[in-house]
Structures are given as structure tokens and as C-alpha cells.
Amino acid sequence: MNRKLQEAVPTGSISPSAEELRIIRDSVLLPMLLTIVDRNAREVEQSGYAIRRLYVAASQVLMNRIHIDLARARKELRQRQIKVFEDEQIDGVLYYRFICRGYEDRFGLMRDLARREISQRIGRYVREIFQP
């Protein structure tokens, strides 16, 4: 942590729980999922694929579920007094800062790992849609 951040952290502040860290991570990854699914749906919609309507409809269902989860994550962040900020990107790593009840820290997501996790999450959402 840089000096400015260290000064902002009050002594006795409580670091986030594992559940809160999961919510913070969701708040970062879910918008990425939405962007990817939306972009893919637009590409297919403009293509000549025979099943494009089916794909676009399935994409819309998928985006609705992601929106619900994102709204839930954002609500949890507000209730737990957690703020998350995009920080910087260095050498393929996306950095985010968060403030949790006075505790301030930063974490990084490697692009390759983020892509892998996003792909896994999309697969999970698709399975939930077709195998409720």
C-alpha cells in the first residue's frame, strides 16, 4: 500500500471477510460478463446464422440473470459500507481499490485468470438456465 493509503486506514479497522471479498470480486467480474455476453449477442444478431434468434433470446435471459446478481452484489456492498474503484492496469493486470468500513486495500486481476473465471461463470449461468 502506498503512504497515502496507509494514512487513510484507521487503526482498529476491520478487514473484509471472505464473503465480502467474494462480493467485491463479483462486483468487478459481473459487469465484464455482461459486456462479453452483450457483445457476442450483437455479433450473432448481425450475422447470417440460422439460429441467431435463439442465441439472442438465450443471451437476453443470461444477461437478465447476470443483472440480478450484479444488483444483489451492489446492494450488499452498500449495506456493508464497501466501495470499489477501478485503479489502474499494468502489464495485463487490472487493479481495483476498495474501502471496507475504513479498511482500504487493493487487489489485482490478471487478464488471463479473469477471462478463465468469466468463461467458467458463463458456463455456470448457461447450465442453470437449461438445468434448473
Image (cartoon, grey):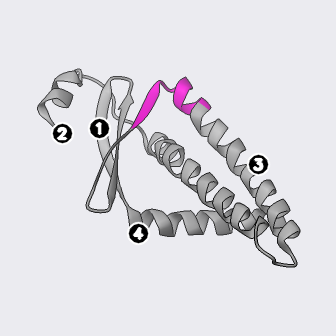
Q: Are marks 1 and 2 in contact (CB under 8 Å)?
A: yes
C-alpha distance separating marks 1 and 2: 7 Å
Disc number placed over residue 42 in the picture, else none: none
> Which residue lies under the disc numbered 2?
1
Above/below status of 51 relative to 24: below
* Numbered disc 4: secondary structure: helix
Horizontally, residue 65 falls left or right of residue 10, namely: right
Is residue 101 among the parts visible in the rendering?
Answer: yes
Residue 30 pos. (x, y %) = 58, 50
Q: Nearer the viewer, residue 31 or 82?
A: 31
Q: In terms of image quadrants, where is residue 4?
A: top left
Magenta segment, which residues?
75-85
Above/below status of 43 relative to 89: below
Q: Specify the amino acid type for callout 3.
A: Asn
> Which residue lies under the disc numbered 3?
64
Count neighbours of disc 3 (C-alpha within 10 A) and say few if under 14, some if 14 to 19, many if 20 or more. few
Q: Specify the amino acid type for callout 1.
A: Asp
Q: Tally the numbered discs.
A: 4
Q: Give the position of the C terminus as an image quadrant.
A: bottom right
Count neighbours of disc 4 (C-alpha within 10 A) and say few if under 14, some if 14 to 19, many if 20 or more. few
> Which residue lies under the disc numbered 1?
105
Residue found at x 66% / y 69%: 123
